[in-house]
Each structure stands twice: as structure tokens, then as C-alpha cells.
Image: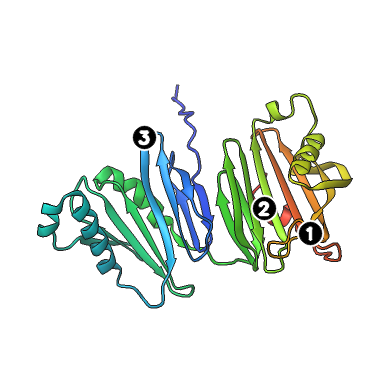
Amino acid sequence: MKKVDHKFIHPPFNIGWHHLKFSLPLYWEVTSYTTNQDEGTIGFASEKGPLGQISWRKVKAVPDKEKIMTEIHRRYIAETDPDKAERFSTLKFFSVNDIVVGYEKNGERYYASTFLEEPKILVEWIFPDYSKNTFAEAKTLLASFRENKPENGRFFFGCWGLEIHVPEGFHLSKISSLPAAVSVEFENKKCHRIVAHRWGMPELLLADTDLTSFYHKFLYSQCRFVIKDTQDTLFYNNMPGSIIEFKTRGKWGFDFLLGPWWKGYATCLLNEDKKRIYALEHIAPARFKQRETVESVLQGVK
């Protein structure tokens, strides 16, 4: 009788973050981040410890990537081993697609870098130690990297089990990444907001309530006051849910407490198979009729 391998291989997690788009290797997690579009960092780790970081920054001209990596390493060893710094001359370089990789020798930290021409963004990686095995994992990340360009008028954001497609003009403004509770907020120049949520452990969250009531309480905790349930028996891709109208203070710069009342439209969904609760909110003035939907923003929710 033929032996069947039932081992489940998890698909790679797709990360979309401002100008960056790549796949995260298995068991790697995003453990630190910043939200600034022109300069920031994302850190990676697993249960074994830190695995490196990716950073980005806007520059004025085409950078000399090899020279920058060499200087970064020179300063690093000057702090950790001054005697060795005097003997250091340069790194060894090779390429993975359009990404330049630099290292000195096995067992030491190594670097990678690429340049995104149109936004003039220099992207840099630092990994903790170079070896054939450790680089094999990092190589899958580097090989998957590409510029996160808009497709069909929408930008992609992906992390922590959320895959979001927001219209051009909206930028990442706020993140809350707690265990089993992730919220990501986007904002445009007019202060209109799109907010996506993902909760885990629905069997606990809904132990003594229903989905709509749970979401009502959450909206209230965010100073979003429910007006009515426009559809409390929604089914989307076989997931039960509801559509809710609410009101909240509009935001003009920092003037939130005295802002006008804006109308929000929210959708919550329960994925019973994956044991996840998803929700989407779009906040704008009441006269703004074009509202974002689950179909357009949370395209990956199935």
C-alpha cells in the first residue's frame, strides 16, 4: 500500500508595506515595525530569536549600494572588534535578481540592498549570520521581493493574516498588532479613513454574545456610535456577518474632539473554518457616497 504524506505545507505569507512587497519564509514573523512611508524598518524573528531586518529610506540620487554596505559593516566591526576593523577592506558581493548581497565570511552578519528608481527608495537588509543554511531562507525572501506598485488603482498591504487593497491616495497611518487582535488604519489627504481588523479565538470572543453585538461593543470602545444595522444577516463567501452604520467625529488635522460628525459604514464577518473575525470600516463625511466594501478591500478574505 502506497504511503501518503499528510504533512501540511503552509503557503508563504505575503507582506505588503508601503513600497515593499515580498514573501515571508516559513516560521518568520514580523516583530517590529514603523509606519513612515519615506523611512522605516521592519524586524523579523522566530522562536529561535532575531532573524534580521529590512529598512527603507528616500534618497536624492542613485546610491552606491556596495560602498554603503561596506561602510555599514566597517562601522559595525569598529564597535565590536576594533582590531579587526583595521584589517578589514571590503565585502564579497553577489546578486539575487536586482538585489546586491554583501558578506565578509561565514558566521558574521551580512547585508543586501536594492534601489527603487521611481520613488527613489533605497531598500536595505541586515541578517545576523551568513552560512549556506541561513542564507537559503533569506534567499527566498530576497528572490520574492518586488516594488509594491498599485494594481487597478489600489495598493496592497499584507501582514499578520490581513491582506488589504486600498485605493491610491490612502496611506498607512496606524497599526495595533496585539496577539489575536490586529487593526490597520489608512488615511487620505482629506482625513477619510479605512480601517481593517482581524481577531482570533472567536469561540472565546463570542462565548456569551453574538457577532453583531460583539462588534457593536468594539465600535463603541473606539468612539464610533452605532446608528443602525442595515443588514444583520449578511453572507459573504459563506461567512455570516452584518453591515452596520455608525457615526463618529470627523478628523481635520489634530482637531478630532471638535470635528464634525461623520458617517461610517462597517462590515463584520465570521470565518468559522479559520476561526477568525474580520471587519472593515470606512469613515468619511455623510455626503461622500462612494464607500469601500469587503469585496474591494478585503479581497483575500475567503
User: Which of the 4 quarters of the picture holds residue 170?
Assistant: bottom right
Say which amino acid is labelled 2: Gln
Q: Residues within 10 Å of mark 2 (few under 14, many from 20)?
A: few
CA–CA distance in space, label 3 to label 1 = 48 Å
Say which amino acid is labelled 3: Lys
Secondary structure of the residue carrying tag 2 is loop
Measured as percent of width and height from the top left, residue 266 is found at 78, 49
Could you tell me which residue is drawn at 46 percent across and 59 percent down?
40
Measured as percent of width and height from the top left, residue 148 is found at 52, 63
CA–CA distance in space, label 3 to label 2 = 33 Å
Q: Residues within 10 Å of mark 3 (few under 14, many from 20)?
A: few
Residue 299, disc: 2
**Residue position for label 3:** 48
**Left or right of 251 in this view: 114:** left
Work out whether residue 293 can be spotted: no
Q: For the C terminus, give its image quadrant.
A: top right
Could you tell me which residue is drawn at 50 percent across and 54 percent down?
34
Say which amino acid is labelled 1: Leu
First in sequence: mark 2 vs mark 1 = 1
Could you tell me which residue is drawn at 67 percent across and 45 percent down?
197
Measured as percent of width and height from the top left, residue 180 is found at 60, 36
Who is closer to the viewer here, 39 or 113? 39
First in sequence: mark 3 vs mark 2 = 3
**Residue position for label 1:** 258
Q: In the displayed structure, would residue 230 be above or below residue 3? A: below
Closer to the eye: label 3 or 2: 3
Q: Residues within 10 Å of mark 1 (few under 14, many from 20)?
A: few
Secondary structure of the residue carrying tag 3 is loop
Q: CB under 8 Å between callouts 2 and 1?
A: no
